[in-house]
Image (cartoon, rainbow, N blue to C red):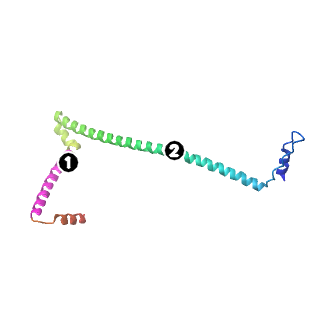
């Protein structure tokens, strides 16, 4: 075939007459050569894939450490933002209080300022909650004095909710 012809062209010529030419290897068929070439390609691809897998396996612990570090930094930033937010709210409330103390138009401002009215509403709700909690405490003391099973009542109330 064509391969036999090509291989005969590239045969080594003996250097001297004493040396015998080495017998040519058995000619392979085209299909066998194609299979061998394909298997070599597959082996090379497998080796490349294995090398890449090893690289990835080596990178995973570093990536995990980086992710953990980033998570900690993000949490610290969240905490800082929360503190700043609280500080800004406190400063704003302090500013409102001081500006109403010093401002000659404070009565006029008090009527127009929604923040002041909101603070007053929150104060009223807080007082209402304090009264309600005090009443609940008294009711629980009275019920406990009569030997009522408070656990069953609590479970019933929670079941209704």
Q: Residue at x 36, y 43 (%)?
A: 75
Give the residue drawn at x 21%, y 42%.
112
Mark 1 burial class by Cα count in 10 Å: few <14, some 14-19, many 20+ = few
Which residue in the protein does label 2 denote?
Answer: 58
Task: Give the magenta-colored segment's residue range.
Answer: 119-145
Does the magenta stretch mainly form a helix, a strand or a loop?
helix
Residue, disc 1: 122
- Relative depth, front residue between 14 and 51: 14
Disc 1 element? helix
- Neighbour tally class for label 2: few under 14, some 14-19, many 20 plus, Cα within 10 Å: few
Which quarter of the figure has residue 73?
top left
Please, what secondary structure does the residue beneath circle 2 have?
helix
Residue 17 point in image, percent of width and height: 90, 41
Residue 59 percent coordinates (x, y): 50, 44
Q: Is residue 40 above or below residue 145?
A: above
Left or right of 76? Residue 60 is right
**Residue in view at x 19 percent, y 42 percent:** 111
Q: Nearer the viewer, residue 131 or 40?
A: 40
Name the foreground residue: 20 vs 151.
20
The answer to whether the residues at label 2 and label 1 have Cβ atoms under 8 Å apart is no
Q: Is residue 138 left or right of residue 1?
A: left
């Amino acid at each position: 075939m064509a391969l036999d012809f090509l291989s005969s062209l590239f045969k080594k010529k003996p250097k001297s007459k004493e040396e015998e030419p080495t017998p040519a290897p058995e000619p392979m068929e085209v299909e066998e050569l194609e299979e061998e070439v394909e298997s070599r390609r597959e082996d090379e691809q497998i080796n490349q894939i294995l090398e890449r897998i090893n690289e990835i396996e080596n990178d995973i612990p570093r990536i995990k450490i980086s992710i953990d570090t980033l998570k900690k930094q993000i949490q610290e930033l969240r905490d800082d933002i929360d503190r700043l937010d609280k500080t800004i709210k406190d400063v704003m409330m302090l500013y409102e209080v001081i500006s109403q103390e010093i401002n000659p138009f404070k009565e006029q401002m008090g009527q127009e300022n929604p923040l002041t009215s909101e603070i007053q509403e929150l104060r009223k709700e807080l007082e209402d909650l304090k009264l309600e909690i005090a009443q609940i405490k008294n009711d629980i003391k009275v019920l406990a004095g009569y030997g009522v099973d408070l656990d069953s009542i609590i479970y019933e109330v929670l079941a209704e909710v």
